Image (cartoon, rainbow, N blue to C red):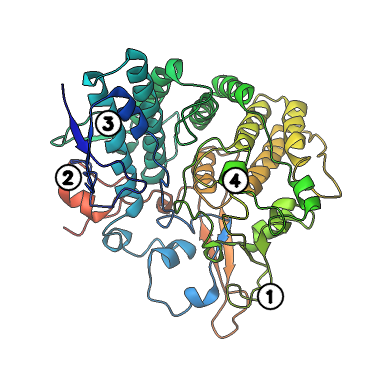
């Protein structure tokens, strides 16, 4: 019988991690984990955080206050915001909280997968613990590969550099970097291995449900352009949970200042993963949306009208046509890294559009918009072409899946398709007249979309190499 002395923390302490070694879970009042039930309980990890600072401004949806850019010593935020490919990103990125945390969580899942079979308890509980850990291990690898590698392209994925796959609990492991295709194969195997044993209603909300697992499966298939399989998985997810929070009715009730909707009360949520942990969106003034996105919302969208601030003289440049998320998480919980039912609807709409089932695609969009649009045109007309229909889907994704990973990942995957690739331009500054106004451009094939591995990881593992043509400073 193997015993595991480990602390089950609500928040894992951060320590340095590389692809050649796991990060230890920091002991603090250690427990002895020796039963299958205890290993299963370890899957529940409230407060999982995945910072977005490595790429936050490499999208067309977010903006920076002008005083945080003008005259400031270049940093990763200003480099990304001004799309500056000339600066040495690698030397700047000495470490990465996202990288550390993602691999720390993978270490946790591997601990469960590797050791639960030798624990006391029912075989069914062991299978469930392993299945839940595998679905989360797959999810963390998905976030990592879409962060540090090129978007999945069926033509090049087998040769495109990916990330290190961590598939076992082994503190001496020294894996080589896998290709993007190999990482996706690993992710899909974990999903398929897990699905037969997952539950419709798990032990608590921090354990993965079947609705979440099939939603994630749909997302992976969609990113690989496996459209038929993506549609089937999306429909399966919605068979378990198809609820949409009615923001139109919520607006009539008075919104978040009158009726709080904390995390447990948001019926759309399929998984609780955050940018910042429990206090998700409590730093909303840091999440300024671009003039382009604010214009896209229009004047009758509850997603904007209920939650954004447009009048602050502290957090906004007046006259810039920007806005920031102004609602604390205790008044309304908005998931940014985890999945929710409305993303599943949007994936289903995209699948229909890609199959040239344009009416079905728009019908799905209108089902969502009926719970979002306060007045005016709620039901969109059916466009004449697939490309126009895809544009409707993409725009709806921008408005519904705000501020976390989704827009960055969407740009990367869509930029691998000529039909949907986008060149982003931003004119800056808008308000300040003391410095010249410039137009900044981010091309679809820019190396900026591939975030460099942190120096701490590169230095510890010679097998880990950059996925761009940038140089390491050693």
Q: Eyeballing the image, is 436 above or below 150?
A: below
- The residue singled out by tag 4 in the image is 401
Residue, x 33% and y 47% (percent of image)? Answer: 101
Disc 1 packing (10 Å; few <14; some 14–19; many ≥20): few
CB under 8 Å between discs 2 and 1: no
Decide which of 204, 404 is in the foreground and name it.
Answer: 204
Among the two numbered marks 1 and 3 on one chain, the one whose residue lies closer to the N terminus: 3
Of badges 1 and 3, nearer the viewer stands: 3
CB under 8 Å between discs 3 and 4: no
Of badges 4 and 1, nearer the viewer stands: 4
Residue 69, visible in the rendered structure: no
Locate the C terminus and report the quarter of the image it occupies.
Answer: bottom left
CB under 8 Å between discs 2 and 3: no
Kindly identify which numbered label has been placed on residue 461: 2
Among the two numbered marks 4 and 1 on one chain, the one whose residue lies closer to the N terminus: 1
Q: How many dots with numbers?
A: 4
Decide which of 468, 359 is in the foreground and name it.
Answer: 359
Disc 1 to disc 3, C-alpha distance:
51 Å
Disc 4 to disc 1, C-alpha distance:
26 Å
Give the image location of residue 403, x and y in percent: 55, 53
The residue furthest bottom is: 434
Of badges 2 and 4, nearer the viewer stands: 4
- The residue singled out by tag 3 in the image is 110
Disc 2 to disc 3, C-alpha distance:
20 Å
- The residue singled out by tag 1 in the image is 319
Disc 3 to disc 4, C-alpha distance:
30 Å
Give the image location of residue 167, x and y in percent: 26, 29
Give the side of residue 449 with respect to residue 114, left or right. Answer: right
């Amino acid at each position: 019988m193997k015993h595991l002395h480990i602390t089950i923390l609500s928040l894992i302490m951060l320590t340095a991690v590389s692809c050649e070694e796991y990060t230890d879970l920091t002991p603090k009042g250690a427990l002895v984990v020796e039963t299958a039930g205890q290993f299963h309980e370890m899957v529940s990890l409230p407060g999982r955080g995945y910072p977005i600072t490595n790429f936050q401004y490499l999208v067309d949806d977010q903006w920076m206050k002008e005083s945080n850019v003008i005259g400031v010593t270049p940093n990763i935020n200003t480099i990304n915001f001004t799309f500056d490919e000339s600066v040495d990103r690698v030397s700047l990125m000495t470490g990465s909280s996202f990288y550390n945390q993602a691999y720390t969580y993978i270490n946790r899942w591997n601990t469960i997968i590797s050791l639960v079979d030798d624990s006391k308890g029912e075989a069914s509980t062991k299978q469930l613990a392993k299945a839940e850990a595998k679905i989360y291990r797959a999810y963390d690898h998905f976030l990592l590969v879409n962060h540090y590698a090129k978007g999945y392209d069926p033509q090049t994925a087998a040769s495109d550099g990916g990330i290190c796959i961590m598939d076992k609990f082994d503190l001496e492991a020294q894996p080589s970097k896998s290709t993007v295709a190999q990482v996706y194969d690993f992710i899909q195997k974990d999903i398929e291995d897990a699905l037969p044993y997952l539950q419709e209603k798990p032990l608590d909300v921090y354990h993965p449900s079947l609705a979440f697992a099939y939603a994630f499966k749909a997302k992976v298939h969609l990113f690989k352009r496996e459209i038929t399989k993506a549609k089937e998985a999306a429909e399966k997810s919605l068979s378990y949970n198809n609820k949409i929070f009615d923001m139109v009715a919520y607006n009539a009730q008075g919104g978040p200042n009158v009726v709080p909707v904390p995390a447990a009360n948001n019926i759309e949520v399929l998984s609780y993963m955050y940018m910042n942990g429990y206090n998700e969106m409590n730093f909303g003034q840091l999440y300024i949306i671009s003039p382009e996105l604010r214009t896209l919302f229009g004047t009758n969208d509850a997603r904007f009208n209920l939650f954004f601030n447009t009048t602050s003289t502290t957090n906004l440049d007046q006259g810039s046509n920007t806005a920031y998320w102004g609602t604390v998480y205790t008044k309304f919980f908005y998931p940014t890294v985890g999945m929710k039912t409305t993303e599943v609807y949007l994936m289903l709409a995209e699948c229909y559009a890609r199959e040239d089932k344009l009416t079905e695609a728009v019908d799905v969009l209108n089902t969502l918009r009926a719970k979002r649009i306060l007045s005016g045109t709620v039901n969109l007309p059916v466009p004449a072409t697939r490309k126009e229909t895809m544009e409707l889907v993409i725009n709806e994704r921008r408005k519904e899946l705000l501020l976390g990973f989704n827009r960055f990942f969407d740009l990367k995957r869509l930029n691998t398709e000529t039909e949907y690739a986008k060149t982003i331009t931003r004119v800056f500054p808008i308000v300040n007249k003391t410095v010249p106004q410039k137009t900044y451009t981010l091309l679809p094939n820019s190396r900026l979309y591939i975030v460099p591995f942190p120096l701490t990881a590169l230095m510890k593992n010679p097998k880990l190499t950059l996925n761009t043509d940038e140089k390491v400073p050693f």
